[in-house]
Amino acid sequence: MRLLFDHNLSPRLVNILADLYPNSNHLYLRGLDQESDQIVWEIAKTENYLIVTKDSDFNELLILKGFPPKIIWIRLGNCSTKTIELLLRNNHETILSFGEDKNLGILILK
């Protein structure tokens, strides 16, 4: 399960969560933090990533384009990287199931 973290999340999550989500990446670490959502969408699709974000932009693309890629939309307000880490750790099984489900394109975590 490869996650691609959006620019609104800490790049540190890649290393912090490497035990559960190996080969994940962050837009900043890939040099994609200034790219449009459309470009990020295509890269995630081509490279088989699930996009993890805190904003609605990728949800709107999902509605327009369908999936893949799939979206994990974190619906928490301003919070720490530790809070995001725990959310993704505590929902690991749910995220794995979501990644394998051919009928779901978005997972909302709060």
Image (cartoon, grey):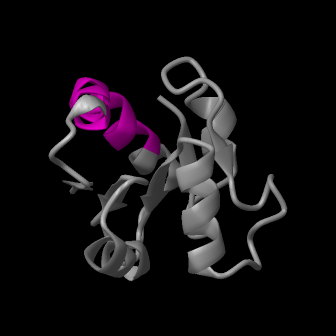
Question: Against 110, is 92 above or below?
Answer: above
Residue 77 position within the rendered picture, expressed as x and y whole percent measured from the top left: 33, 72
- Indicate whether residue 100 is drawn in magenta: no
Which of 49/92 is in front?
49
Residue 109 position within the rendered picture, expressed as x and y whole percent measured from the top left: 23, 53
Q: Residue at x 62, y 67 (%)?
A: 40
Which of 7/67 is in front?
67
- Indicate whether residue 91 is drawn in magenta: yes
Question: Against 41, is 90 above or below?
Answer: above
Q: How many marks?
A: 0
Q: Residue at x 37, y 30 (%)?
A: 89
Which residues, given as a range, are shown in magenta?
A: 85-99
Residue 27 position within the rendered picture, expressed as x and y whole percent measured from the top left: 70, 60
**Residue 79 position by quadrant:** bottom left
- Left or right: 59 as drawn, with respect to 83: left
Tell me the quadrant of the picture where the C terminus can be found. bottom left
**Residue 65 position by quadrant:** bottom left
Which of 98/87 is in front?
98
- Left or right: 85 as drawn, with respect to 41: left
- Left or right: 50 as drawn, with respect to 32: left
Give the farthest residue toward the left.
103
Give the farthest residue toward the right.
31
Q: Residue at x 42, y 81 (%)?
A: 57
Q: Overall secondary structure of the magenta stretch?
A: helix
Residue 39 position within the rendered picture, expressed as x and y whole percent measured from the top left: 65, 73
Q: Residue at x 25, y 23 (%)?
A: 93
- Left or right: 94 as drawn, with respect to 64: left
